[in-house]
Amino acid sequence: MIKKLTTCLISILLFCVSMKAQNEVTHLWQYRYLVDRINGIYIPKDIDEAIDTLDTILSARDKQYITDSLSLWDFRASTHHGLGTWIRNNWGLWGGSRLSRYFRDRRVFHPDNMSGEILKAYYKKKIQRLEYSIEEDIEPDDGDHGVKVVKVSRLYWITKYFRKNWWLVRKADDERRRKLKEEGFYKGGTVYFQFPFGCSTAEEQAIWLSADNCDSLPKGKITDINYSLREIKVKLMSTISPYGIIVFDGDLTPDEDGSLERDFDQFTVDAPNRFYMQKGDELWFDPNSHHWVSRQHQEQ
């Protein structure tokens, strides 16, 4: 009995850890889906912009060679691991971007197929001078149906497992609820934005560094909580600057010690690869992220 109980608890723990990691990735993709630059590189918003951007990248000599020597099949095959790799890596087709979301909305899910559609569209429109229609010419992924079957099957077994062990799941949720409340995270509670991760200006950082209490910091209100995934939904109630607070920065990279410090001498508030949360906006967060802290955590 003890062995069986231990196995169940370990399974639940692994499932929760997996869901938490997946959820953190989902939050990151929320911001990547919104910004028009990632790591300083402009991300086309649709296939028409992708074609026009690609046309500025290729030289006149490249275009002439493609026109004289390559069929559509040869062009896609010969550029899959060169130009195609550049497209996939730099336009966020692997890590998530507004362009990848554009294709996923049209049932093209694999980055290889996304870049293939871009190359095909470019060849037809710019090389052959033909009309290209995303509705008529795009080829949705053949494996979409199979993916849905796998998801349904996985959902069936997860549902069956938790029905059988519902009392363990309920106990785990109650424990997460208790811990979050102890940490100061509860529905209707106030949380404070944690500088200096998202400072828009050096003045904001100075306010944070000199603050004696939480009252001068941007405030948020917890409007909902997902206890299973350990998430809080925060509505931004006040800010210091009119820009709001930064919740995603495509250029920001950790220093050698892992800290995230912004160089205000090089920083500009109007960079397009940055996503701000404005007063009144609501977003989901991990309470252990760099964004929000409760009063007791801030005053420690």
Image (tube, rainbow, N blue to C red):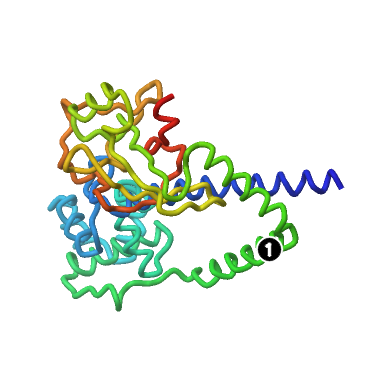
Where in the figure is residue 207, as x and y percent of width and height?
23, 26
* Residue 176 percent coordinates (x, y): 59, 45
> Quick check: 20 left or right of 121?
right
Q: Residue at x 40, y 26 (%)?
A: 299
Instruction: Name the residue at 16% across, 25% down.
Output: 265
Of the 4 image quadrants, the one containing the C terminus is top left
Residue 276 sits in quarter: top left
Question: How far across and how far down the image is residue 210, in percent?
Answer: 26, 21
Q: Is residue 74 above or below residue 83?
A: below
Q: Looking at the picture, does residue 266 appear above or below residue 176?
A: above
The type of residue carrying mark 1 is: Trp
Q: Quadrant of residue 74?
A: bottom left
Between residue 265 and residue 107, name the one nearer to us.
Answer: 265
How crowded is the residue under tag 1: few (<14 C-alpha within 10 Å), some, or many (20+)? few
Residue visible at 84% across and 44% down in the picture: 3
Viewer can see residue 84:
no
Where is residue 79 drawn, in percent x and y? 32, 54
Residue reaching furthest to the right: 1
Q: What's the residue at 34%, 33% (across, down)?
A: 194
Which residue is nearer to you in this view: 154 or 129?
154
Taking depth in this image into account, of 79 and 236 the one nearest to the observer is: 236
Given residues 132 and 206, the one toward you in this image is 206
In the rendered structure, the answer to whether residue 81 lies left or right of residue 62 reads: right
- Identity of the residue furthest to the bottom in this view: 136
Q: How many marks?
A: 1
**Helix, strand or loop status at disc 1:** helix
Task: Give the vertical position of 53 relative to 41 (above or below).
Answer: below
Say if residue 162 shows up in the picture: yes
Q: Which residue is mark 1?
A: 157
Residue 157 found in image quarter: bottom right
